[in-house]
Amino acid sequence: MKNTILYIVVPCYNEKDVLSLTAKVLKEKMTALIDSEKIHNASKVLFVNDGSKDNTWEIIKQLHKDNQVFTGISLSRNRGHQNALLAGLLTAKQYADIVISMDADMQDDIDVIDKFIEEYEKGYDVVYGVRNSRKTDTAFKKYTALMFYRLMQWLGAETIYNHADYRLMSKRALEGLAEFKEVNLFLRGLVPMVGYTHSIVEYARGERKAGESKYPLKKMIAFAIDGITSLSIKPITLITKLGLIIFLLSLIALVWVLIVKFTDRAETGWSSILVSIWLLGGLQLFAIGVIGEYIGKIYKETKQRPRYIIAENLIEQANKEN
Ligand code: UDP
Ligand code: MG
């Protein structure tokens, strides 16, 4: 299988603290894979600079200068993890037979890459890395993540449990992914939709080796809402059902009100009116909010803005020089 060209795509946003360590580990891995003839020697690590504000891009360019196993593209500005990842995947697809995506912070066990390749050789087009333990995550992150996967499943969106964006994809799977033109990106939900046969490799996820998490709680919640609303319209259906139920209940209440009125026992209405005003007001606002989320999504999709713009591409520069 030494003819298989592998690209490892690593999105990087302000990762100056961890990048040299990551590069060292990845270089060793690539060298070992090439030496044992598991992959072609044109295989590369593709760093995607997602508009970093620190000197991440300078570090990437230096790595590329020192060793041809490293290459990179730089986006014109910060576009967020999912867009940066997509930019890397779609760029790598042009040169590689298989592409593995992973984070820059070395939280994902690098030795799993060998297993990914083995699964690919067995004929699988997509191989998901799945965390079998979250020992290093806080109880809060563990719990919220679990709830999120449960919720997604219940809403009917297909995602792989405990799978982040550590996965292998074949060229044809990536070509399938390229056909999905949506601007609201949630790759974990899109990749299963591409189809083809898939396999799962379990691994233990470690701690971030240096630097800080780029996913604070606020971004995590936004990411979860994005995931739900771009994969499922069940929330809107639920609201319709809820509205119907409340309407039916109000019919019963109407009958009750009439009975009270005609049996001359009025005046008791104050508390029930107040409660229903608050309840219905709250429900209506919530419902409008959910619908608004979807309209916002439609608005974004109809504009058809580019999902990323590549400002610099070291692969093409190198090709021109040769
Ligand atoms: N990242 C990115 N753009 C962003 C935010 C994050 O490319 O706007 C990258 C980041 O450099 C890292 C990966 O996405 O390689 C995952 O981020 P992080 O490790 O901070 O997330 P966590 O593991 O804490 O969820
Ligand atoms: Mg991380």
Image (tube, rainbow, N blue to C red):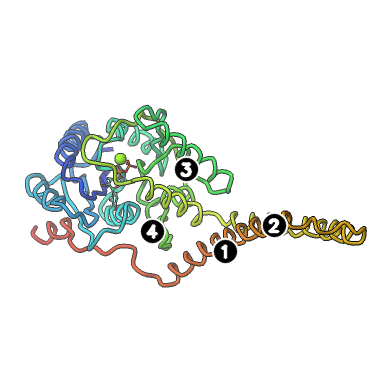
Labelled pair 4, 3 in contact (Cβ < 8 Å): no
Under mark 3, the amino acid is: Thr
> Farthest residue in the right direction?
263
Q: Secondary structure at mark 2?
A: helix
Quadrant in which the C terminus is drawn: bottom left
Residue annotated with mark 3: 197
Q: Nearer the viewer, mark 3 or mark 1?
A: 1
58 left or right, relative to 257: left
Mark 2 vs mark 3: give the one in front: 2
Identify which residue is drawn at 54% across, 40% down.
Answer: 150
Instruction: Say whether marks 2 and 4 touch (CB < 8 Å).
Output: no
> Label 2 belongs to which residue?
276
**Labels 2 and 3: the sequence-earlier one:** 3
Sequence order check: which comes first, mark 3 or mark 1?
Answer: 3
Frontmost residue, 169 versus 253? 253
Could you give the CA–CA distance between mark 3 and mark 1, rounded to whole angstroms?
Answer: 40 Å
Q: Nearer the viewer, mark 4 or mark 3?
A: 4
Residue placed under numbered mark 4 in the picture: 178
Label count reads: 4
Q: Quadrant of ligand 2?
A: top left
Instruction: Provide the secondary structure element on which disc 3 rests.
Output: loop
- Disc 1/disc 4 C-alpha distance (Å): 33 Å
